[in-house]
Structures are given as structure tokens and as C-alpha cells.
Image (spheres, rainbow, N blue to C red):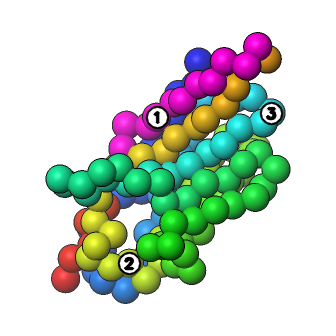
Amino acid sequence: QVQLVESGGGLVQPGGSLRLSCAASGSIFSRNVMGWYRQAPGKQRELIAAMISGGSTNYADSVKGRFTISRDNAKNTVYLQMNSLKPEDTAVYYCNCHQSSATGIMYDYWGQGTQVTVSS
């Protein structure tokens, strides 16, 4: 019911910046949680940033102060601004939407992922 399309990944030098976008379509409920995850080769997928519909945000310690999650409801798009990038930020980044129906059923939707490579 929800489709997420990510874009904005690429190759960037250490200390550089990149902004990821996640365009959402479908049955987006009024109350939901949008999140950004990343997964490096051979490592577990980790939640790095999340935003609830009310605007509250949370960040993983590894990216706090460097990454910012935001959204534009008019465009149905969620962003992840990534500054001061480090080689250890290299991973595939995924957009996630978590929401519940009126009957209490929970849903999780995922984007296709976009590669971010930080290297000199």
C-alpha cells in the first residue's frame, strides 16, 4: 500500500555531504514513523534516524550531530542530510515507513536502497 523510492546516493570524499531522498506514495496514514536504515557489507542493518509524524526525531549515536532527517509533506518526501561523512558511513541506505491501520495491524515498507560510498 506504500511505495518508497530512494535516490541521492553516490560517491563522496570524507568530510563531504550528501542528501538522500525518499519519495513516498500510496496509503500514508496520518500517524507514522519514517526512518533511515543502513547496512554495510557483512554487518547488521541499523536504524540511524527516525521521525514520527508529529516531528520528533531520533538519531543513532554514530550519526548524531552529522545527519539530519526531515520531510516535506507537500511532496510526500523524506530526506536525510548527511554531513561530515566518514568512510565508516559507507553502506546501502534504506528508507522505511512504519505505521498501523485503524484495526491495529502494523505495516513496514522499504525502499529499494541507495548506495553511499565515502572514499578518498
Label number found at residue 110:
1
Q: Residue at x 35, y 49 (%)?
A: 45
Residue at the image point whose x is 63% and y is 24% from the top: 106
Query: Which residue in the protein does label 3 denote?
Result: 30
For the point 44% across and 69% down, the residue is 18
Q: Secondary structure at mark 2?
A: loop
| Residue 109 among those drawn in magenta | yes
Left-right relation of 9 to 25:
left
The secondary structure type at the circle numbered 1 is strand
Residue neighbourhood size for the residue with mark 3, other residues' Cα within 10 Å, grouped as few (<14), some (14–19), many (≥20): few
Marks 2/3 in contact by CB < 8 Å: the verdict is no
Label 2, label 1: how many angstroms apart (C-alpha)? 24 Å
Q: Is residue 105 above or below residue 47?
A: above
| Residue at 33% over, 69% down | 89
Q: Which residues are magenta?
A: 103-113
For the N terminus, the image quarter is top right
Asked whether disc 1 touches disc 3, contact meaning CB atoms under 8 Å apart, the reply is no
Mark 1 / mark 3, whichever is N-terminal: 3
Left or right: where 94 falls relative to 87: right
Residue 15 image-quadrant placement: bottom left
Please name the amino acid that badge 3 sits on. Ser
Residue 111: in magenta span: yes
Q: Amino acid at mark 2?
A: Leu
**Viewer can see residue 90:** yes
